[in-house]
Image (cartoon, grey):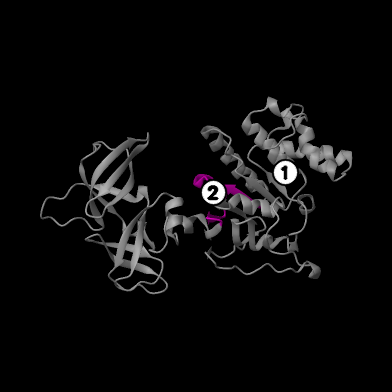
Amino acid sequence: MKKSPRTRRGAHAEPAQESQAAGIVPENAVELRNVSVTYGTTTALAGLDLQVARGETVALLGPSGSGKSTALKAIAGFERPSGGRVLLDGRDVTDASPAQRGIGVVVQQYALFPHMRIDANVAYGLKARRMPKAEITARVKAMLEMVGMEDHAHKLPRQLSGGQQQRVAIARALAIKPSVLLLDEPLSALDASLRAEMLIELQALRAELPDIAMVYVTHDQSEALTLADRIAVMRNARLEEIGTADQLYNRPASAFTAKFLGGASLLPAVSTTVVPDDGGMAAVVVGSHRMQSVAPFALAPGDRARMAIRPHAWQLVAETPEGTPAPVNSLPGRVESVQWRGAGHRLQVDLIGISERVTVDLPALSKVPVPGDLVVLAVDPQHAVLVPAGDHA
């Protein structure tokens, strides 16, 4: 399956070919072209360009107010764009009602009809389309079997658990055979253990629906990393960055992405070497310490950047005796706090001479430092990446 290229702020991917008249099925199931949504003087979504290919899952990830749910509502037809166009399967649906778009939608609270049995809930969209009764019965049965709810067809929603209601909502959305399925934080109402279980089920469901494009809105990075082929990071009503999970996690192009997706610490760095346009390893100074880091962009001596290091990338090394050179890519610090997290320990460490505090996740330690201890932290240069200094997380 051909994926759209990675894009960052203000970058525009090539539009889909509107070639249905020629008998060619468009590659993109969903396309937003410079879509904006405003309410008076408030901008909820600003100039979003986004493409979702057939069979692809794209997660819209960001904090509250970032524009991710507004983007989904624009696709669904629940919000009329103030500017730009919305295309589904190459067809301009900007002015079409939600019912005319033929898409499936699953929202946070599932929105099941409380007075209808489960089978009637799943059949609702089919009846609205005036399908023959025999076809409705067969389709409802097939959908309930797909989500493992065939034994609950005659129950009411209040007789089901939250996870079961979510499965029914998905079955209802899929019953109309949509080419696009929209999911708006569908796991947010579930407890942690049930959320983990439903993530596994959504993964399995994804494998059974190879031709459906999915747009999945979430503020939970684990959901995005687990389910999405690509992740669109949203910030302040705009697209911050889009790419595969591996790209965004290991080579983020902005400080915000590095911080939001994986909780990286961001240290001020000054380049002491030349890095070409296609990137490479950079020698930098962090405080008074010489370090090495991956640089995905061009640098000249004296250029400023920020070094992003994720909590699990740090290593705790023994304090070096006075007069002994410190290990490569190491920084001294003082432990501020220690948390035991079951499988390991999380430390907050104040770096000495840099005025920065970093988060350090370590496996279970035989000798656990205590607040006030002096430590030395080290990081593999391949696990440190530079991001532009002008980006603020």
Residue type of the residue flagged with mark 2: Ala
Query: Can the viewer see residue 192?
Result: yes
Q: Position of residue 327 (x, y in %)?
A: 21, 55
Which residue lies at the image location 69% right of the left edge and 41% below the top edge? 170
Mark 2 or mark 1, which has the lower sequence index?
A: 1
> What residue did someone put label 2 on?
224
Q: Quadrant of the N terminus?
A: bottom right
Callout 2: SS: helix
Q: Is residue 221 magenta?
A: yes
What span is in magenta? 211-237
97 left or right, relative to 360: right
Picture quadrant where residue 381 is located: bottom left
> What residue did someone put label 1 on?
173
Q: Residues within 10 Å of mark 1 (few under 14, many from 20)?
A: many
Which residue lies at the image location 46% right of the left edge and 56% below the top edge? 257
Q: Residues within 10 Å of mark 2 (few under 14, many from 20)?
A: many
Q: Nearer the viewer, residue 168 or 110?
A: 110
149 left or right, relative to 280: right
Which residue lies at the image location 37% right of the left edge and 35% below the top edge? 341
